[in-house]
Image (cartoon, rainbow, N blue to C red):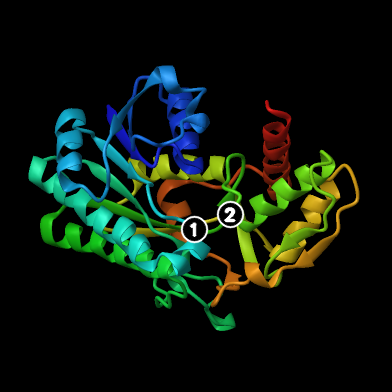
Amino acid sequence: MTVLITGITGMVGSHLAEYVCKHHPDVQIHGMVRWRSPLDNLQSVLPKIQLHQAELRDLNSLIKLLGKVRPDWIFHLAAQSYVTTSFDLPADTLHTNVIGTVNLLDAVRIVGLDPRIHICSSSEVYGQVTQDEIPIRESNPFRPASPYAVSKTGEDMIALQYWLSYKIKTLRTRMFTHTGPRRGAVFAESAFARQIAQVEAGISKGPIRVGNLNSIRTLADVRDAVRAYWLLLEKGEPGEVYNIGGEETMTIGELLERLKGMARCPIEHIVDPALLRPSDVTLQIPDTTKFREQTGWKPLITANQTLLDLLNYHRDKIAGH
C-alpha cells in the first residue's frame, strides 16, 4: 500500500510518518513538501520515506504529484494552522486551507484516483459553545470564532461536498486539543514549555508571558492522535465526520501549573495583553463516542506524560541535542 502525507514536516505529519514506519513497515510513505520546508522533524525516518515538492495552491503541481505517487490513502494534514496568525493573515489562511483542499480533491478527481482521504478539520469549527452543549457532538452547530476556524469550516464542508457530488472518499476529523514533542511554540502549552526551558537554562530570567488562562481544553497526545488517524482510514466510513480527543480536561491555567510543577527552578508568570486573541474559544470538551465505537480507539498517553515530553523536547532543543 502507498500513502501520501501532506504536511509531513509538521508535528502531526512527522509523528504519523514515524508511526507508519514502526507499525506498518510494508507501507510506502510519500510526503509532500515545499522547497523551503525544514526537515528537522523527519530525521529519524528520512531514509524510509520519499519526499516530493508540491504546493497546495498550485493545482498543476498536485496533479503531477498524484499522477506519480498514485496513493491508496491520503492524510491531508497541511494547513495554515495558527489561530493567532489567521487574524493577521485571514485571506492567506483561507486560500491555503480551503482552496488548497479544493485543489487536492480536484487533483484526485482529474487524475482519476480512488483513495481514502483523511481531511483534517478542527474542533475550532464549533466555536464558543454553551454549557448545555457539553460534551460537543458532531451535530453541534458551527460558530467559527477566528479566520482559521472559518477556513477549517470551509475545508470540512468542501470535503463533504466532494463525497456527495463525486463520491471521492473523504473522511473528516475534528480533532480537539493535541500536543506533544515538536509542537510549534506559537501554541500556548508549547510557548509555556519553551519559556520554562529558557529560564532553566539561564537564557531568560522570567517571568514567562502567557495569554488567556481561563480557556478549558481536553488534552490529547499527538502520538495518540496519529494512531487515531490511521484507524480512521482503516475503519471509518467515507463521507462521515468524527470528533477525536483526549480524556483529561483542564483550564489553560491548570495546564500551566502542571508545567511549572515539572520545572527545575521556580517559575513566575504574567499575562501579556498582546497574547490575548480578538475572540477566543474557551470551552472545548468533546464527545468522541462515535469514533471510539467505529474504531475501538482510546487514548493511551496521560496528559502529564505529554506535557513532560513537550518540556523535555524544548530542553533538548536549547541544549542542542
Percent across and percent down for residue 308 are 73, 42
Other residues around mark 2 within 10 Å, as few (<14) / some (14–19) / many (≥20):
few
Structural distance between the alpha carbons of marks 1 and 2: 7 Å
* Horizontal relation, residue 261 to residue 25: left or right: right
Percent across and percent down for residue 16 are 45, 36
Percent across and percent down for residue 255 are 73, 58
Q: Residue 196, can we see it? A: yes
Determine which residue is flagged by label 2.
186
Residue at 46% over, 34% down: 38
Q: Quadrant of residue 143?
A: bottom left
Residue at 33% over, 66% down: 91
Q: Residue 238, can we see it? A: no
Determine which residue is flagged by label 1.
82
* Horizontal relation, residue 267 to residue 136: left or right: right
Q: Nearer the viewer, residue 122 or 148?
A: 148
Percent across and percent down for residue 153 are 35, 67
Compared with 171, 128 (above or below) is: below
